[in-house]
Amino acid sequence: MISVNELALDIFEELAEYPEDYNVEFHQLDNGARLIDCGVSTKGGYLAGKRFTEICMGGLAEVTFRNGHIKDVPMPFIDVNTDFPAISCLGSQKAGWTVKEGSFFAMGSGPARALSLMPKHTYEVIEYEDECDYAVICLESDTLPNGEVMELIADKCKVDVSNVCALVAPTASIVGSIQVAGRCVETAVYKLNELGFDTKKIESAIGTAPIPPVKKDSTRAMGCTNDATIYHGQIYLTMRAPEIVDYLDKIPSNKSSSYGEPFYDTFKAADFDFYKIDTSLFSPAEVVINELSEGKVYRTGAINPDVTLKSFGLL
């Protein structure tokens, strides 16, 4: 059986052994738990962002960078591909665990979720859960977790606290920008799952999104990083599921009633209340699907470079 925690642990150990090569800092807490600061009080960078994203996807994806353009504006892009879309995206990368302990708050994602089964329904749908003595978690937070937070994670994952390994990066950081843009494929798989489609039928996936510039605070960074996929994420899925034709019109972000302006502006107009925003907005801009059983290809949605550039502060 594939163990996302075991695969991710190998990558974590590399960062822990050579933190200076990645502009990160390694810490071991008094209770033995280990964590790597990828941007709270460190610079981080592209290599750290690559590893963070690979760990977040349970070691089941390849992550690369390239220099591209949005219209005539040069911009870095992240490319992500996986042959295990349901497990890597929903079973690992999905930010399905809100980690709260005392004053600490973080969105938790990564392989540890497959031990804690957060949320359980996701793992029932994809028919997967992990068995591993180590729990590797990715935390999107402006602060580093203390021993009590790591104890909480250990308890939920049913592992010894000394076997908890955490990576931490703020949204408003280089690694934060990279790892959120690196969720481009996940948004497509997640959207199909929300629509009731059996994502186990997706055999492979590849996607790309621009890596947004780092903003000055987490709220603006959240808007900017989400827009990278909402308005410019392009995904290609390979599957055996002729019934996908019934889902095509519901997949892309431009079908949402909240579509059309940078997410920060939309969020602000909603008085920063997520419940006032149509959740179908959190989808990729454009999706192409190769349906193998009938040998057909479908395309839905379109990129919106003007809104992308406006969000990034370049228009």
Image: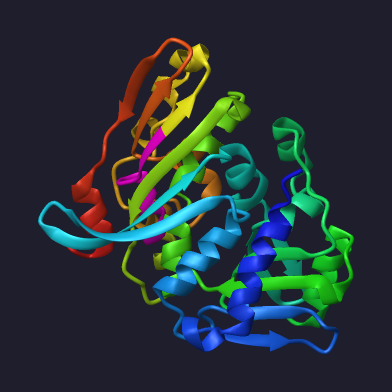
Residue 229: say if magenta. yes
Residue 243's spot in the image, x, y percent?
Answer: 51, 12
Q: Who's the residue at 79% across and 74% down the image?
A: 150
Quarter of the image that includes the N terminus = top right
Q: How is the image coloured?
A: rainbow
Horizontally, is 13 left or right of 148 in the view? left
Quarter of the image that includes the C terminus = bottom left
Residue 306 sits above or below residue 310 on the image: above
Identify which residue, 38 or 18, lies in the foreground. 18
Residue 110's spot in the image, x, y percent?
Answer: 65, 57
Identify which residue, 225 or 154, lies in the foreground. 154
Residue 67 sits above or below residue 102 on the image: above
Residue 297 sits above or below residue 231 on the image: above
Bounds of the magenta segment: 224-236
Q: Residue 125 sits in which quadrant?
A: top right
Q: Who's the residue at 34% across and 20% down the image?
A: 298
Residue 271's spot in the image, x, y percent?
Answer: 46, 56
Horizontally, is 276 left or right of 165 in the view? left
Residue 174 sits above or below residue 84 on the image: below
Evaluate whether residue 230 shows in this view: yes
Evaluate whether residue 145 shows in this view: no
Q: Which residue lies furthest to the top in this view?
A: 294
Identify which residue, 247 or 51, lies in the foreground. 51
Q: Who's the residue at 70% across and 75% down the image?
A: 104
Residue 82's spot in the image, x, y percent?
Answer: 51, 44
Residue 145: say if magenta. no
Q: Residue 169 sits in which quadrant?
A: bottom right
